[in-house]
Amino acid sequence: MHATPADFSRLTPNAVLDAVEAACGSLLSGLIRPLPSYINRVYEVTCNDGTPLIAKFYRPGRWSRAAIADEHAFVRACAEADIPVIAPIAAPSGETIHETDGMLFALFPKRGGRPAEPANDDLPLWHRLGALVGRVHAVGARISAPSRITLHPLESTADDMDYLLDGGFLDRHSEAEFSRLAETFMDAVVPLFEDVPMIRIHGDCQRTNVLDRPDSGVFLIDFDDMMNGPAVHDLWMLLPGRPEDVPDECDALLEGYNLFYPFDHETLTLVEPLRAMRMIYYLAWCARQSHDHAFRHNHPEWGTPAFWTRELNDLATQVGAIG
């Protein structure tokens, strides 16, 4: 079945301002600035005393309240451990999740910074990035996130495959090819995940989600896709290439990581399976958005035979790269 379209139509500027004022207990200046975000709706607002706030309204139907609570608990635990992250602001009651007109939202302090863009030979920065992720994982390993997905071929990836195959998104030829690739992939990778620890991880640890501030160094943002998964997933996404192709950067990253959390080098064998899993996740993510008018407008080729031919060729190449 296709997902129900998220309805943000009632989220007018006045509705945003009223909701934020009720949540934070402060009057706002009336200025509101939408920030780029396709999945959620994010706004910058300003209190009368000049304090800027970021209000994040979660896409209805995407995460349950319990799943958002898992995200907030993880980020707040990182902040309490003095890890540079941006934690949600708690109300006097301690609550960080608010609701207005059926929509859940949270407030965050505004933090500036530029995306961390380490040059390949900037090994000290790669070391710092590894240390940052290691600190996050040391906190993530304490408890699980029961309402979040688990990044495992038999769990999240199987769900993504079933969604694509059961939803009628592929033409007959593409569906047969995808089914063949799915079977080949599962046979190859499921044994690799046996006994691999699943801890709380960022889940979308691209360099665009690491900001660099002159006063405080690198910090990690946007835990919206946090999940339970293998630690290596948050590391391979930072690298500019396959680990064997960028050995110096990989060594520096892992050296920094190991200062705070032990890395199992055998899990480097999961990098190419995880890359394929991310490709499958992306296809399922697109399918889940395909009912959305804005998505269709921005991705007019999505779902066409030409689209599936290209994507499945890429996926076949990636599956073939798994040893």
Image (cartoon, rainbow, N blue to C red):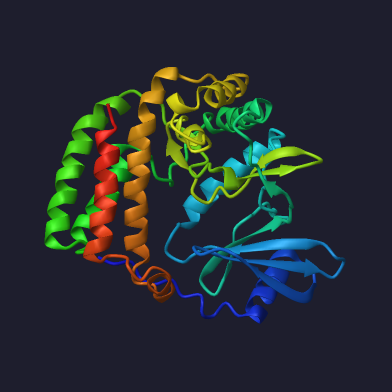
Depth order, front residue of 241/219: 241
Quadrant assignment, res 134: top right
Q: Is residue 183 above or below residue 61?
A: above
Count of numbered marks? 0
Q: Position of residue 12 (x, y in %)?
A: 60, 80
User: 134 left or right of 30?
Assistant: left
The residue sitting at 51% across, 80% down in the picture is 9
**Outermost residue, right direction?**
49
Q: Position of residue 72 (x, y in %)?
A: 59, 48
The residue sitting at 59% across, 46% down in the picture is 209
The residue sitting at 37% across, 39% down in the picture is 275
The residue sitting at 58% across, 47% down in the picture is 208
Quadrant assignment, res 286: bottom left
Q: Position of residue 297 (x, y in %)?
A: 41, 74
Depth order, front residue of 101/6: 6
Can see residue 102?
yes
User: 293 left or right of 169?
Assistant: right
Q: Is residue 323 above or below residue 183?
A: above
Q: Quadrant of the N terminus?
A: bottom left
Depth order, front residue of 48/214: 214
Quadrant assignment, res 214: top right
Q: Quadrant of the C terminus?
A: top left
Can see residue 163?
no
User: 19 left or right of 29?
Assistant: left
Q: Position of residue 52 (x, y in %)?
A: 78, 62
